[in-house]
Structures are given as C-alpha cells and as structure tokens.
Amino acid sequence: MKPLLEIDDVSVHFPLRQGFMQPGLTLRAVENVTLSLQRGKTLAIVGESGSGKSTLGYSVAGLRKPTSGAIRLNPQRQSERGSGGIQMIFQDPFSALDPRMMVEDIVAEPLRLGETAFARKERRAKVAEVLEQVGLPADAANRYPHQFSGGQRQRIAIARALIGDPELIVCDEPLSALDVSIQSKILNLMDDIREKYGISYFFISHDFGVVRHIADQVAVLYLGRIMEVASADDIFSKPSHPYTQALFEAVPRIGRGRRQKGHALKGEIPTPLNPPSGCVFHTRCPRARENCAKVRPKLEPAPGRPGQLAACHYKD
Amino acid sequence: MGFVANTLRLNAEAQTAPLLSVDDLTVSFPTKGGGHNAVVTGLSYQIAQSETLGVVGESGCGKTMTSLSLMGLVPGRGRVTGRIGFEGRDLLQQSEKQWRDLRGREVAMIFQEPMTAMNPVMSVGQQIAEVLKVHEGLGQRDSLDRAIDLLKAVGIPSPAQRARDFPHQLSGGMRQRAMIAMALACRPKLLVADEPTTALDVTIQAQILDLIIELQEETGMAVQFITHNLAVVSELAHKILVMYAGRGVEYATSEQLFDQPLHPYTQGLIQTLPDPDRKVDRLHVIHGSLRVQPAQGCRFASRCPLASDECRAAEPILREVAPGHFVACVKVN
Ligand SMILES: Nc1ncnc2c1ncn2[C@@H]1O[C@H](COP(=O)(O)OP(=O)(O)OP(=O)(O)O)[C@@H](O)[C@H]1O
Ligand SMILES: Nc1ncnc2c1ncn2[C@@H]1O[C@H](COP(=O)(O)OP(=O)(O)OP(=O)(O)O)[C@@H](O)[C@H]1O
Ligand code: SF4
Ligand code: SF4
Ligand SMILES: [Mg+2]
Ligand SMILES: [Mg+2]
C-alpha cells in the first residue's frame, strides 16, 4: 500500500532581490528532501532554528509551492467536507486564532458550508462534537479566544484541525508556547486523536523529549538538508550522524548532575545564502576531515542498519 | 591572640554568610477594589558566593517578579515588602540613588529577550562601553577596549568587528552573549538570569550554560537562574527553589530535589516531562490549572492527588524536613 504522504526530492528556494540591476541571491531553505509518512504514524522533523522545518511543513500543508520536486498525498477517506485531507496547527496559540471571531466560527472555518438553516444546524452540531473531542465544554463555542488560556487555545486549534476529518495534520511546534503541565495533556490528547481517528502527524519540534514520545520516524534537518532519517527507536538508541549526536548531547537531562563543560557544539548554523561546500555540517563537525569540505555525502544506510539513513562519510 | 582569632573568625563568617538573603519577600499589586493582590508571598532563600540557585515554576508563578525585586525594578504600583539582605544591608531600605548605583555594578540581570534590554540604535560595543564609563569612570578609548575584551570573553568571534554591530544585526545566541557581556562588565557579585536560554536552540543553550558556569568559576559571582525548564536547572544549579502560585513549595539542593522530590507538585513536574531517553505509553499529567486556587489552605490542593481536609485548613509553609531540604506540605514529615 502506498504511504499516506510522499515527499519526493523537494526543494524550496526563496529568491531574494538585491538592489536594482544587481544579481539576485537565492536562499535555499529546503534542499532535495525525500521523505514518506505511513498512514496513522507520526513523522517528526527536528533541527535548529532556520533549518527549514516550517518551510517544509508549509509545503506539505499546501501553503507554499515547492520550487522543485513533488508532494503527494494518497488519501483513503473521501473527504466530502472540502479540507483536502490536510490541516495545520501552529506554534503560537495566541496569534493563530483571530481574536474577533467567535470560537464556533474559528473551528468551523475549514468546513466551508453554505449559509442555509440546515448548514448552520449541521455546523453547530459538528463544532460541538469536535470541541468535546478535545476536552472543551460545549459553551466554549460562543466565546472569544482571549477568554481561554494557552492550553485551551491550542485545543481550539486542534478542534479546528479535526473538524474537516483530515488524514494528516501538520503540527508546527504545537507545544512550545505551553507550560510543561499543559504540554503533557495536549500530547496525550494528540495520541488519543491519532488512535481514534486514524490521523497521521507531520510533527515539527525541537524538544527531544516530546519527539521521543510521539514520533515513529524522525528526520533531522540542517540547512535545509536531511542529515539523518530513521525510526525513533533506532535514532534515539544509536544516532548515526555527528550532527544528530551533537543535538542529543546538548539536550539537558535530569539525573546527569551538574553539566560537564566542553561538550557543546561550537559555532552557529551558517547562513543558508552561502552554505558550506561539501558536507554542509563540516564547519562545526567534531569529526570533519579534509574531504568533508569537498565531497557532499549521500544519504545512505548506517553500517548494519538498512533502515537508518545518514548523510555522512564517517557515520556510525 | 584574641585579635587574630577574631579576625580569622570574622573572615570565616564573611565567607560562609550568604551573599544574598531574602526574607519573607512579598510582592503585591493594588486591585480595583482598593485591596492588594500578592503575586509573590513570603518567599525566603539564600544564595552564597559562587553558588547558583535555580528558581522553577509554571508561567505566572512569580519568578520574574522575584527577580525584579532584587533589582528594584518591580513595575507600576507594585509593592515589595520583607527583607532583601545583600552583603549585610537591606536593599529594600535603599534610596533610588543607591539602587541605581547597585544595578549593573553589584547586581546585574539578563533577560529572555535581549532586545528589550538593549538600545536598538547604539552599537553593541558602545552600549557596553557606556556601562563602563558610568560605573568605572573609564574614558571612551579604554571603555571601548574593555568592551571588546568582554565580547571576546563571552565567545563572540571577531569581537572588534561585532562591537560595531547594532543588536538587530546579531543572531539570537550572539545577542544573548552580548547581553551577558554587558551584565558582566562591572563584575557583579550577583547575576540574575531570567529565562536567558528559553528562546534559543539546544546547541546554543548548551553554549550559554557553559559560559555562565565558566564565568562563575572565574569570578565567584552568585547566580539566580530562573526557568520553567527543570532539566536546565538540574544541570546548572546547586540549589533549587520550586515556586507555585507565588509561594516557595520546595527548597533543597539539586541532588536532594531530583533524588527525592518531596512536594507533590515537584513530583508531578518531574513526572510530567517526556524523557528523551525513555518512552512511556502515557504521559503523567497534573490536573487542573494554576489559575484555580482554593480560597484558603494549600494553594495546590485543587490539583493535588493527595489533598484532604487537613490541607484546606491552613496554608502550609516551608519547613525543614531534612538538613537543607525544605517542603511546604502537611503530608511530608
Ligand atoms: N518567506 C521567506 N522569504 C525568505 N526567506 C525565508 C522565508 N521563509 C523562511 N525563510 C528562510 O528560510 C530558512 C528556513 O526557515 P524556516 O522558518 O523554515 O526554519 P525553521 O526550521 O522552521 O526555524 P525555526 O525553528 O526558527 O522555526 C531560514 O533561513 C529563513 O530565514
Ligand atoms: N504590572 C502588573 N500588575 C499586576 N499584576 C502583574 C503585573 N505584572 C505581572 N503581574 C502578575 O504577577 C504574577 C507573576 O508574574 P511573573 O511575571 O512574575 O510570572 P513568571 O513566573 O515570571 O511567569 P512566566 O514564566 O510566564 O514568565 C502573574 O500572575 C502576573 O499576571
Ligand atoms: S561528512 Fe564529514 S563533516 Fe559531514 S558530518 Fe560526516 S564527518 Fe562531519
Ligand atoms: S498540603 Fe495537601 S494539597 Fe498541599 S501539596 Fe501537600 S498533600 Fe497536596
Ligand atoms: Mg519554524
Ligand atoms: Mg517570567
């Protein structure tokens, strides 16, 4: 059976205009990304700020056309309600909801029903149903976003994503604006929804605890390119790529005692306007050798682990 | 003989007496009805030289108000009572001029968003130089040289060039470094850091945490580090204060707190974190919300799995239940 989502050699470039008559620059936000997502599973995208996670997410959600490559969705359900099978939820539950709209209108927005009396009734019933699914009281429908806390607003956003009966939800850091005690509730809710309604998540995050919990598959991006992609079990138990290893190492953890200095990855992510030659990670890589700056490594299986792909000449 | 012994003892005391000793700190704001609403209530803690205290708790529990109190910067009509002992004097009894002399020189603060603390139209180097001119009386030339040294010390590459940049020209991580350089310009005895790494990538966060530890080892400054991230404080702090709804609910060394958390809220906070090293089927949740608080008794009672009538009778305050381990819960002996 075909995977639900196929991302086939996708690149997203932004032309940046310089002054009049000057040659334009191109920002390569996403470069030759190939990924697939099985039905009912969660694919997590991780990487530092500016690595292209959101840009890829927008493209998957159909909000930004790739410069090249193809994105295919192979839906199974007949989506009679016109949302195209994909919905998106965003990081900031405070700015993502229009403050002037009532919750009922916000949540019902993807339905695109007419204004007949019958449509209004159906709409109301459907909104009540999804609000219940995300654990909000029915009377929430008649209130405005500012009357809700951050966690409740994120529930409203999830309700809106659910109403069109999508098969895929693109989640762009949906928890990072929330307190820890609320994060775990929303994560559990997302787990339940996935199981009950057979939904898949394209889940963007930089919290490795959250990714460990929710992801079946993990892709690590750096400067728009995939450094490593593998099942969550494989990548967490034995990361192959030096960048993945450095990211895991940097994650603060309880139970390690006071931190040992000197393990931190040096330097910052270079500008995507002028990415390093060869392996784009070579300027920061503790394992870099001479040919790393010359030859671009291909995304290939780690030794002895056919399902774990890493783009590194000296992968583990 | 007696004189020597006395001097020795005094020296020993000076070394062991905490640099900062906060006693019964309360911050409140006037309400519409004419009363006062306390957002920090009866907080007490100490920080010694070369020591880092981590302050953790959910959004709105009063972490920032606590830090601003130490700087004399509580906004608007906020009222601060209690005692803030700093090197033997009470900061709350100071004049505004004394506060100005203290800020930046003896106590310095760094924030989550450096842009709010920096002047957007002055180069980074010049901003640091201005601090040095005011507090150290250096001239333009010397102060700018020192500023460049400081930018170098916090790990900014090509510091002489970067000194000429404006804040918006730096990346988030570099801006945070520049703000640390500015805060450290006068070698403060106490650094108050309010979520300085929350907006940064984990790799840059690790660099900044290393930097703070390194500078502390070098200068012996005390650090109050505020965050909602328990894992971050576990790697940085010697002692930890857990706050809930304006109150301290647990106060202990880092080892005590993570080896044997005693307050139900602390236990909940630790359990609720998804662990990057271990996958569980279902995450632990703390029910309810900080905003729902009972009228009297324990503030956590509406969310606490152990709550009973006894908890609602009177508000528990911090008690020492093991040497150096304080808990505010009636069920802990
Ligand atoms: N509309 C745009 N025009 C020009 N450049 C853009 C645009 N959107 C994004 N970029 C650039 O593309 C790169 C990738 O950005 P993107 O927002 O996808 O990163 P990200 O991984 O989501 O980062 P973050 O973790 O900060 O959200 C960045 O260098 C960004 O500056
Ligand atoms: N100017 C003000 N007037 C009245 N109340 C205020 C004012 N500023 C803050 N508060 C209240 O004081 C309480 C504590 O706020 P504080 O900013 O210290 O929380 P915090 O723990 O730092 O939260 P966060 O993690 O979100 O930064 C909050 O309930 C807040 O609403
Ligand atoms: S190819 Fe070289 S520079 Fe790139 S990750 Fe591997 S070792 Fe490091
Ligand atoms: S006093 Fe009671 S309600 Fe409060 S934390 Fe302890 S057991 Fe829970
Ligand atoms: Mg993004
Ligand atoms: Mg704060």
Image (spheres, rainbow, N blue to C red):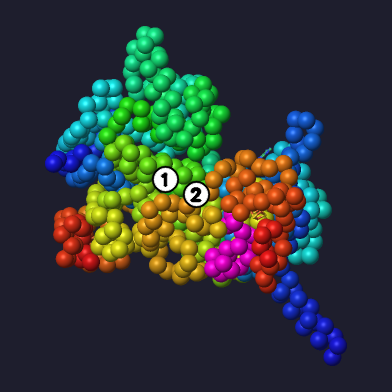
Q: Residue at x 37, y 57 (%)?
A: B279
Residue B161 versus residue A160 in the image, above or below:
below
Whether residue B69 is visible:
no
User: Residue B107: x and y, percent?
Assistant: 67, 57
Mark 1 Cα within 10 Å, few/some/many (few <14, many 20+)? some
Q: Residue furthest front?
A: B309
Tag 1 subunit: A
| Residue labelled with disc 2 | B285
User: Residue B161: x and y, percent?
Assistant: 44, 53
* Residue situated in front as seen by the camera: B1 or B97: B1
Q: Quadrant of ligand 2?
A: top right
Residue A217 image label = none
| Residue labelled with disc 1 | A188
User: Residue B313: x and y, percent?
Assistant: 75, 50
- SS under mark 2: loop
Residue A241: quarter of image: bottom left
* Residue situated in front as seen by the camera: B265 or A241: B265
Quadrant for the N terminus of chain B in the image: bottom right
Mark 2 Cα within 10 Å, few/some/many (few <14, many 20+)? many
- SS under mark 1: helix
- Which residues, given as a range, are shown in magenta? B250-266
Three-letter code, disc 1: Asn
